[in-house]
Amino acid sequence: MNQDPTENIAEILLNKSSVKQKTYRNVCKAFKQLHEEAKLLIDVISAKTTERDEDIKLSVTSISDQEFHIRIAGDLLVFVLHTNIITLTDDYDYNKSDYVKEKPLRKYLGQINVYNFMADSFEYNRLNDPGYLLARLLINVENHFIVEGDRQIGFMFESVSGKPLEGTDLNVLIKLIITQAAENDLIAPPFPKIRNITVKQQMEKSQSLGGGNKIGFQMSYQNDTH
């Protein structure tokens, strides 16, 4: 007698659901730790900068259980916890690794994305201003992690971690993210591109005209156009 296919379906769902729930608990815990590390680090930096320039704006603001912001002078770093557990495409080295082949359920990942915006974009409600993905933290069911990023971020975290995520890892990551945001500058658009404007543009977008774009960040698999 053939096995009831619903039994197999139920077993698959139970296994995947259990892994995804544990993965989500891991990424939620990491997000809370990131928030706490951010507050501690900003307190330290603020104490150092206030002595020399008290006008430098530094703060950490909780938006929701899935989002918090770090204000670094003219930059705003937006940390977003995604509520869905995801998998990467098959061409990722992670999915082709022996680590995942050994236990395929390790492919399920929770993710935290970090975006870099200009702080004025939020303050003046400039909805068309671009932001840039600065880093992405991916965590699996065993609390091992991957960090995608450019420059030092990508260099420090080249492959899946050999051990579960710790507070020291998050401290290093936060410092690298803040450093990269602080080092990126604004590039004004060429003069000919902003020479002609309409009345509507002037009335609706006067705050952003000629404001420039952040020298951004691209994921390592994208072509660098800078």
Image: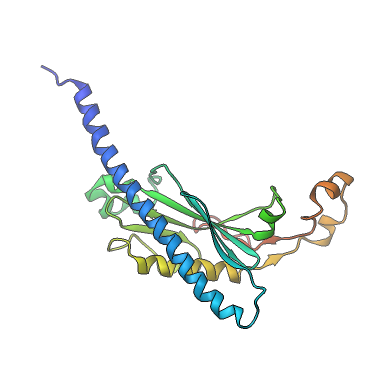
- Give the x, y percent position of residue 31: 41, 55
Give the side of residue 204 with respect to residue 82, left or right. right
Describe residue 96's horizontal placement relative to residue 50 as left or right.
Answer: left
Residue at screen point 35% across, 53% down? 94
Q: In the image shown, does 23 or 73 lie closer to the viewer? A: 73
How far from the left and from the top, in percent, is residue 82?
Answer: 45, 46
Identify the image quadrant of the C terminus: bottom right
User: Eyeballing the image, is 55 above or below 65?
Assistant: below
Quadrant in the rendering for residue 8 = top left
Q: In which image quadrant can residue 116 be found?
A: bottom right
Query: Percent from the top left, x then y, of residue 55?
Result: 67, 73
**Would residue 4 be seen by someone viewing this image from the given angle?**
yes
Pick out the residue farthest to the top. 1
Residue occupying image coordinates x 36% and y 48%:
109
Q: Is residue 115 above or below residue 56?
A: above
- Evaluate whether residue 139 shows in this view: no
Extreme residue toward the left, this view: 1
Q: Residue at x 14, y 18 (%)?
A: 2
Residue 53 lies, with reference to residue 138, above or below; the image says below
- Residue 194 image point, x, y percent: 83, 56
Residue 184 sits above or below residue 21 on the image: below
Quarter of the image containing the N terminus?
top left
Q: Residue 167 occupies which quadrant of the picture?
A: bottom left
